[in-house]
């Protein structure tokens, strides 16, 4: 999304327009009727030089805020947004549909913004990076990443958008190509969930392919020493732990490899209805809640759905099952290189990953849980490459933890920002 802050009524470009600059500044009082005074939002929720906030719905009506942006539909970002909301929320079309139908926010208060172009974004479906451009004697440029899996594509697209005059529309043709230079930004609001050297992820595409291959081998009754199976079952059930939205790539890849359909409970079907079936017995692949992805939870799931499948294999998102470092092998415990040119050839930035990398974490005669290093947040080295790739005056973390962690994160960001692409 590309947004321009001006003093006028909100306007959205027509559905077929390639114009991607927007103006949203209608002021309304009484956004949340309440008898108590909410605490004020932290500074990193406000976009400087604009009347906009990002992911700031739990603070009640925010003084002078005329546009509430939502990066994606995860509860820690939309928390506080309810059907009584009477301001203006701006988000992607997918997120807008969820806000309307899951939270009951009125149609006239939800503005769905088209993206610059159709492209693969390594993050939650419907998630968006938001680019703000504030007109004036000096144009202020702000990048808000939301929750994202950083990739070189993001830096190239930011560079091409910011290189375009405010008076010109941005078209898909402008965003293509390989070389775009280093973009300049006044502020970058960065998803710093895993800004620690111990967090190194294999490529998401490699993880998805490995999970698909693992499930395919199990489905074809290929013997795997790690599985505690005393006799060959007639069939298998593959359950993937999911949030409200997210992990769809794993579901789709497993279903594709097994030539299967996908089953999910009623609330999940409303989100993924195009790919789902109503009867669980028809699908080898089930979308289940993250709380179910453990030995006890899956045993209870099988009992509750007795008769659908005699055996269960669970590819689980291991970030919830193991809060420690995601890569524990000694070869990958080195600290991330501090110079951008070293990041491109350092082993931790492209970890090799295959089906042999997947090992069960808990196993019984009926249930096996496979932790999977699938993340929709950026790893340490991916964050390093992104920060080095953008010439930012200020980089502000959007994930706040302990004071020691915050100081360490700020030190890394300052170091990379000062060295850039050297």
Image (cartoon, grey):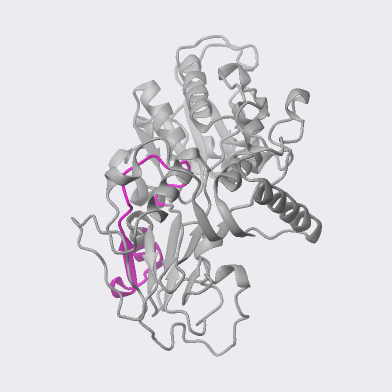
Q: Residue at x 54, y 27 (%)?
A: 313
**Residue occupying image coordinates x 36% and y 25%:** 256
Please tell me how many numbered marks the rendered image carries.
0
What is the residue that sits farthest to the front in this orientation? 137
The image shows residue 54 at horizontal and vertical percentages of: 50, 67
In the image, residue 389 sits, relative to residue 67, either above or below, namely above
Q: In screen coordinates, is 106 left or right of 404?
A: left
Is residue 363 visible in this depiction of the protein? Answer: no
- Give residue 204's position: percent from left, percent from top: 52, 32
Q: Is residue 416 shown in magenta? A: no
What range is drawn magenta here? 98-126
Question: Closer to the camera, 88 or 283?
Answer: 88
Q: Closer to the camera, 289 or 377?
A: 377
x 77%, y 54%: residue: 405
Q: Quick check: can you spot residue 335?
A: yes
Indicate left or right for 198 with 47 as reference: right
Residue most extreme to the top: 223
Which quadrant of the rendered structure holds the N terminus?
A: bottom left
**Viewer-nearest residue: 224 or 211:** 211
Q: Residue at x 51, y 85 (%)?
A: 63
User: Residue 175: x percent and y percent?
Assistant: 34, 44
Residue 296 horizontal side relative to residue 197, left or right: left
Q: Does residue 365 lie above or below 161 as drawn?
A: above
Percent across and percent down for residue 161 are: 38, 53
């Amino acid at each position: 999304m590309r947004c321009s802050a001006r003093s006028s009524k909100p306007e959205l470009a027509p559905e077929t327009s390639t114009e991607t600059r927007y103006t949203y500044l209608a002021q309304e009082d009484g956004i949340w009727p309440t008898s108590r005074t909410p605490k004020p939002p932290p500074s990193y929720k406000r976009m400087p030089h604009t009347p906009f906030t990002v992911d700031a719905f739990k603070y009640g009506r925010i003084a002078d805020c005329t546009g509430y942006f939502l990066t994606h539909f995860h509860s820690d970002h939309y928390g506080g947004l309810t059907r009584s909301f009477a301001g203006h929320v701006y988000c992607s079309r997918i997120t807008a549909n969820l806000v309307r139908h899951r939270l009951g926010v009125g149609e006239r208060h939800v503005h769905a913004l088209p993206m610059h172009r159709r492209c693969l974004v390594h993050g939650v479906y419907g998630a968006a990076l938001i680019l703000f451009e504030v007109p004036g004697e000096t144009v202020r440029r702000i990048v808000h990443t939301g929750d994202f899996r950083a990739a070189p594509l993001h830096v190239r697209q930011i560079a091409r958008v910011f290189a375009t005059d405010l008076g010109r529309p941005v078209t898909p043709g402008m965003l293509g190509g390989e070389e775009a230079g280093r973009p300049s930004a006044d502020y970058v609001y960065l998803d710093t969930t895993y800004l620690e050297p111990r967090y190194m992820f294999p490529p998401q595409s490699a993880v998805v392919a490995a999970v698909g291959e693992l499930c395919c081998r199990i489905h074809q009754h290929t013997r795997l020493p790690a599985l505690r199976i005393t006799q060959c079952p007639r069939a298998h059930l593959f359950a993937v732990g999911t949030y409200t939205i997210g992990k769809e790539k794993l579901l789709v890849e497993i279903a594709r490899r097994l030539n299967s359909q996908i089953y999910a409970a009623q609330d999940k079907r409303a989100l993924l209805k195009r790919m789902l079936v109503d009867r669980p017995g028809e699908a080898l692949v089930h979308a289940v809640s993250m709380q179910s992805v453990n030995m006890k939870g899956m045993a209870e799931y099988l009992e509750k759905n007795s008769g659908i499948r005699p055996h269960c294999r669970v590819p689980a998102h291991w970030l919830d099952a193991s809060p420690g470092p995601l890569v524990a092998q000694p070869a990958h415990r080195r600290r991330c290189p501090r110079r951008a040119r070293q990041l491109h050839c350092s082993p931790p930035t492209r970890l090799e990953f295959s089906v042999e990398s997947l090992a069960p974490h808990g196993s019984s005669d009926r249930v096996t849980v496979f932790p999977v290093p699938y993340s929709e947040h950026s790893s340490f080295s991916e964050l390093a490459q992104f920060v080095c790739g953008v010439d930012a005056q200020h980089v502000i973390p959007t994930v706040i933890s302990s004071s020691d962690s915050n100081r360490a994160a700020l030190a890394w960001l300052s170091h990379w920002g000062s060295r850039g692409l050297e």
